[in-house]
Image (cartoon, helix red, strand yellow):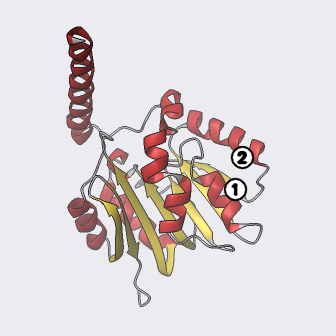
Amino acid sequence: MGTFLLVIAGLVGLTTVSVLGLRLLSRHHPTPCPHWLAPLLENPYMNAVAGSGVILERARVQPGMAVLDVGAGPGRLSVPAALRVGPTGRVVAFDIQPGMLARLHQARTAAGVTNLQTVLGEAGRGSLPPGPFDRVLLVTVLGEIADQRGALAEIFTLLKPGGLLSVTEVLPDPHYQSRTRVRRLAEGAGFEVADILGSWYAFTMNLRKPVAA
């Protein structure tokens, strides 16, 4: 039993050091999750604290809406969002990695959705698709963006007045952004906080574009 506990403690320690190391590195060199790690995005913990149903419910995504999923990855949110908005709505999945979009294409085909478009590009570089959108989703993605202020400014212009940017952050993601930082960046781009849901280690912050904007 003693040896077993030592092994467990060693694995926990190694995981902690790895996450902290990646977190430190990401502060200076923000990088997206590699496409070959996409299967790890689907796990019981993530599904419990930030599953697609939870995120879409928190963002109040409704039938007929136009939704932009920034950093869509393999379509964990994009495909369920397309099903939720229905044939009168549309979803645009935006990602920087061709490998992620290739996986998303497969998921889209398997689900039989026809209202889901994919766009390759980098947020903050002027390549986001044209709006207007009712909702924009940034789920465990903000910390991977090199120009966060530029990306949020772009998103602000794409949202309809009164539309929501829904930002979700989850530990132990090495790119985790605190509620304080998300709020500061978003308010600097012109957003106002609508509500904050969840806990400090797994939260969703809904940010509204003022109607008068």
Check the image and name the residue furthest to the top: 3
Q: Amino acid at mark 2?
A: Arg
Q: Amino acid at mark 1?
A: Leu
- The answer to whether 140 appears left or right of 178 in the picture is right
Question: If you read the primary sequence from the N terminus, does the residue marked by circle 1 or circle 2 appear first?
Answer: 2
The residue pinned by badge 2 equals 108
Check the image and name the residue furthest to the bottom: 212
Crowd class of label 2 (few under 14; some 14 to 19; many from 20; radius 10 Å): many
What x and y, as percent, mark residue 112? 79, 49
Point 55% across, 51% down: residue:
94
- Nearest to the observer: residue 120 or residue 104: 104
Above or below: residue 205 compared with residue 193? above
- Nearest to the observer: residue 104 or residue 98: 104
Point 43% across, 65% down: residue:
166
Point 53% across, 69% down: residue:
135
Q: Which mark is residue 116?
A: 1
- The answer to whether 64 appears left or right of 194 in the picture is right
Point 67% across, 64% down: residue:
84
Q: How many marks?
A: 2
How far is disc 1 from disc 2 in space, using C-alphas? Answer: 7 Å
Q: State which quadrant residue 190 falls in.
A: bottom left
